[in-house]
Image (tube, rainbow, N blue to C red):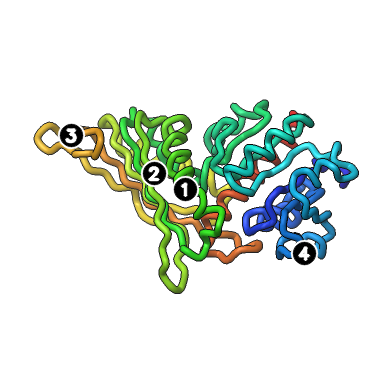
Amino acid sequence: MSQGKVKVAIIGSGNIGTDLMIKILHNSASLEVAALVGIDPASDGLARAARMGVTAISSGVEGLIAMPGFSDIKIVFDATSASAHLHNNQLLQQHGVRVIDLTPAAIGPYVVPAINLNDQLDAPNINMVTCGGQATIPMVAAVSRVTKVHYAEIVASISSRSAGPGTRANIDEFTETTSSAIEKVGGATRGKAIIVLNPAEPPVMMRDTVFTLSDPADRAAIEASVEEMAAAIQKYVPGYRLKQKVQFDLFDDNNPLTIPGLGRMTGLKTSIFIEVEGAADYLPAYAGNLDIMTSAAKACAERLAQTRLL
């Protein structure tokens, strides 16, 4: 092990796992990738791992646990699927390994680094919510720390080309997990999430829209909170940016807003527009939806390594 670095392994040799591996290899001062794990011996990710000097395992989590030196691995990232994570986590917890879950399985607490990472450092399994959640929940939280948010709705639009088999298989889990995290982490009383797979060619970058309905509040204070939160995210996702100024609309008793399932409501509507450009470590720059997940997961592991709570 490189001096001072914490050994980690990545389960999932697809786009997300491979991108995460390359991010850590190129840009982490505190983490060392000990293994990339998959179930397809012919996957590009495993081949790339071998070329980069990383142990490539094609026999899944069982193969990882059986590998020499497994006891030295302190953190395992799971970039498989929600259903596969249930099995992987069950085995890994028997060995006392910290697990960072990049699937929507939501076994452990939801974590968004810019909001609540320090509160969950002791959790044996932390969940990275979803790509849409990582991009939008901080904005809901930014409004929530200024005023009471009664309802928050997010729309995550990603390129169809950046939505692989795992993303497509987990659409239901995406909406359920993101909606729940909008409430539990973002602070909204009620949350709703929508994902759009955009088939445009050339592919478009990830775009997210956040709508909140809150108690009336100082608009300048909300705007400042949003900008401060965006700056915090940019520390670990440099391609994260606000596309335009925050917009506000006031709905009163004479002009209420009708929200499906909730009825007529009044308050301050805040609209926030976001774009996420990927770092293009392994994936194209338009795949910001994948980049924000790997960047957030890397930030979590580095924080664990720095605190040595392992």
Q: Name the residue that disc number 1 marks.
A: 132
Q: Which residue is mark 3?
A: 264
Real-space Cα separation, disc 1 to disc 4, in angstroms: 30 Å
Give the image quarter of residue 8: top right
Query: Residue 254 appears in which quarter of the rendering?
Result: top left
Of the residues shown, which amino acid type is indicated by label 3? Arg
Query: For this view, does 26 lie left or right of residue 285?
Result: right
Q: Using the image, tell me which numbered label, if any, was put on residue 47.
A: 4
Residue with the mark numbered 2: 193
- Within 10 angstroms of label 2, few (less than 14), some, or many (20 or more) residues? many
Place of residue 293 in the rendered image (x, y in percent of width and height, measured from the top left): 57, 49
Q: Which mark is residue 66?
A: none
| Rendering coords of residue 35 (x, y %) | 79, 50
Q: At label 2, which amino acid type do we have?
A: Ala
Earlier sequence position, callout 3 versus callout 2: 2
Q: Is residue 253 above or below residue 27?
A: above
**Circles 1 and 2: CB atoms closer than 8 Å:** yes
Which residue occupies the extreme bottom position in the image? 202
Q: Nearer the viewer, residue 86 or 53?
A: 86
Secondary structure category for the residue under label 1: helix
Q: Residue at x 89, y 42 (%)?
A: 69
Residues at discs 4 and 3 in contact (Cβ within 8 Å): no
Whether residue 147 is visible to the viewer of this picture, yes or no, is no
Question: Who is closer to the viewer here, 1 or 262?
Answer: 262
* Label 1 or label 2, whichever comes before in sequence order: 1
Of helix, strand and loop, which one carries label 3?
A: strand
